[in-house]
Image: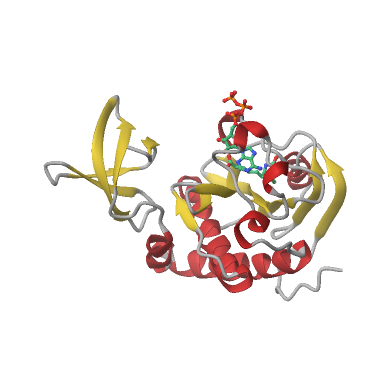
Amino acid sequence: QWGLNTSWLGQRMYYEPQLDSTQSLAHKLALEGAEHGTVVIADEQLKGRGRLHRKWDSQKGKGIWMSIILRPPLEPQRAPQLTLASAVAIIDMLASQVNVKGQIKWPNDIFIQNKKVAGILTEMQAEQDLIQYVIIGIGLNVNQTAEEIPEDLQEIATSLQIETEQTWVREGLIQNLLKEIESVYEEYVQNGFGSIKKRWELAAYKMGDWIKVKAMRKEWDAKLIGIQNDGALIVEDTDKARKVLYSAEIDWNK
Ligand code: ATP
Ligand code: BTN
């Protein structure tokens, strides 16, 4: 049905018409021993979730609601880099299949023209400094029309249909997305985040622009400079002093 051309990603696939959340089913499957590369997809989610316990609007047939089970040979502290790597894969898929230029809003949002088209939710189970499994959740808005975007998201969310004025067959996008994720993942695991860093920076939202950073109990204006080999964001303040951020709240509209 999916015409996959991957070697391991998605070779085990669970496709459900309706789920509370693909993340929840993926966790359950992973705990039961599901293999590396298992993919869960739902047509509709009743309790789709985003970061920080936010809800993720997942209307029936309108988007790609997908969770991927990975068992990477990495230290737990490197798991956030998988979010960054997945973002690069989404950007490549959007460029090659949809012919749109997406941007990565650090750490986990994909934007098209200042609006969010996709989000990534990475969750990890680790024990004694070993990753048991990682679930990469991807929500990509595909076929919503402007009217179908919920009222509270009108200003901030978009879909491929809205941006390109055409509808998209999700299967084709999923096939290519899994291919891209597989290849970026392999590159990343073999050679580290440094090997995909340039691609990440080329796609970064507000690169070289001024933003407002809230971190380490301070708040300051800074310019976005780049990203380090370990995935930390590099910013430069008004005195040209550089700081690296592993986690921070950012006001992008400063
Ligand atoms: P809170 O408890 O913080 O109020 P909430 O469950 O009310 O959480 P909101 O904070 O209103 O959720 O969630 C809004 C967020 O939803 C936005 O930041 C946006 O990223 C996100 N969002 C949800 N679904 C989508 C979607 N399909 N496309 C784009 N953004 C979405
Ligand atoms: C975010 O931007 O906060 C992340 C959104 C992640 C949404 C996806 S949809 C598939 C998977 N299942 C969920 O419940 N959430 C993720």
Is residue 248 in view? no
Residue 44 in percent (x, y) is at 81, 44
182 or 127: nearer the viewer: 182
Question: What quarter of the picture does the C terminus occupy?
Answer: top left
Q: Quadrant of residue 207?
A: bottom left
Residue 159 appears left or right of 88: right
Q: Indicate the quadrant of ligand 2 in the picture.
A: top right
35 or 145: nearer the viewer: 145
> In the image, what residue occupies the spot 87% across and 68% down?
1
Residue 83 in percent (x, y) is at 52, 51
Q: Is residue 221 above or below residue 10?
A: above
Residue 113 appears left or right of 254: right
Q: Quadrant of residue 201?
A: bottom left
Residue 30 in percent (x, y) is at 74, 47
Residue 41 appears left or right of 104: right
Residue 253 appears left or right of 155: left
254 or 140: nearer the viewer: 254
